[in-house]
Amino acid sequence: MSELENFDPDWLALREPVDHGTRSARLEELLAARLTGRDRVRVVDLGAGSGSTLRHLAPRLAELGVAAAQDWVLVDHDADLLARALASPVPAAASVTTARVDLADREAVREVLSGADVVVGSALLDVLPAPVADGLVEVLSTLDPRPAVLFVLTVTGGASTDPAVAGAAEGFDADQRARGLGPDAAGHVAAAFTARGWSVQREATPWRLGPSPLLTAWARGWFTAAGVAGPDPTAAVVPHEDLLAL
Ligand SMILES: C[S@@+](CC[C@H](N)C(=O)[O-])C[C@H]1O[C@@H](n2cnc3c(N)ncnc32)[C@H](O)[C@@H]1O
């Protein structure tokens, strides 16, 4: 596990409110429609970090008419982030446990996914190498019954800033591809699900950032990863995609 990247909790906290407002409402409605009439649902959040998806989706499902008690399992390799998730107030509809798992460990993934009704992941797929993403789809496809799967806010590349900076998007996307699936993740995973008989729906969910601490922090990381310099942007569009597999 030691080779895995650790994500800065301050960065996750900065992006959380923007992420919550960016996620596809339509795909959440389709997910909720699958869950009505149940007494309990087991939700497994892969790469849960400090619990952003729990804080958004648990109340959102209740708002969409899902009356079931929600048993959430937050899965991550980073014990510090999981501890932060547990230290935050838990939404009323949910009970929460955590599991420290490397998603590359297929047997551990199979175990933690056992009995899941819903599997979610946020800002996850683009940081995974192809074999890890493929392993997830494979394990998910062997579950009986199969859960509903919602992967949101996958970076799809080609971000743009005002003023424009030549080579920055290409440099950032190349850096991501050197670490994992990067901007190819959403298409790669959608194709893998479709090949195994899942019905997949995708929706573009770009960040549209104006002057803000998030824009400043994002631009700093974007330029550094791209290996280019440029003026501080006043605005940026950062393409993402949400994917629902049923
Ligand atoms: C960009 S963060 C997103 C965190 C959270 N889902 C959110 O939206 O705030 C990606 C998360 O995936 C986790 N992660 C990445 N690769 C992983 C792996 N192989 N096993 C377990 N967790 C992993 C990281 O530790 C991190 O918490």
Image (cartoon, rainbow, N blue to C red):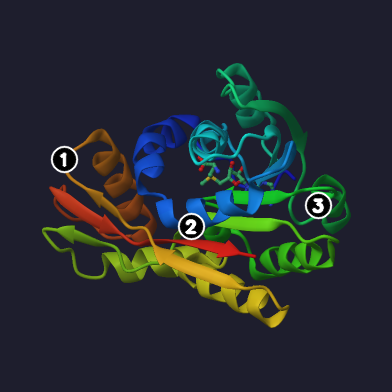
SS class, disc 3: helix
Give the image location of residue 34, x and y in percent: 63, 54
Q: Which residue is mark 1?
A: 211
Does 98 sit left or right of 80 as displayed? Answer: right
**Farthest residue in the front direction?**
37
* Number of numbered callouts drawn: 3
Identified by mark 1, the residue type is Pro
Q: In the image, what residue occupies the spot 43% across and 56% down?
A: 26
Contact (Cβ within 8 Å) of mark 3 with mark 2: no
Instruction: Give the answer, above or below, for where 101 lies relative to 96.
Output: below
Identified by mark 3, the residue type is Val
Closer to the eye: label 2 or 1: 2
Decide which of tag 3 and tag 2 comes sooner along the chain. 2
SS class, disc 2: helix
Q: Which residue is mark 3?
A: 109
Does 82 sit left or right of 219 as displayed? Answer: right
Q: Which residue is mark 2?
A: 27
| Figure quadrant of residue 110 | bottom right
Give the image location of residue 120, x and y in percent: 62, 50
Q: Nearer the viewer, residue 112 or 116?
A: 116
Q: In the image, what residue occupies the spot 64% across and 22% down?
A: 86
Q: Nearer the viewer, residue 69 or 176?
A: 69
- Give the quarter of the figure containing the C terminus: bottom right
Decide which of tag 3 and tag 1 comes sooner along the chain. 3
Instruction: Give the answer, above or below, for where 145 lies relative to 95.
Output: below
- Mark-to-mark CA distance, 3 and 1: 40 Å
Mark 3 vs ligand 1: CB under 8 Å?
no
Q: In the image, what residue occupies the spot 32% across and 69% down?
A: 158
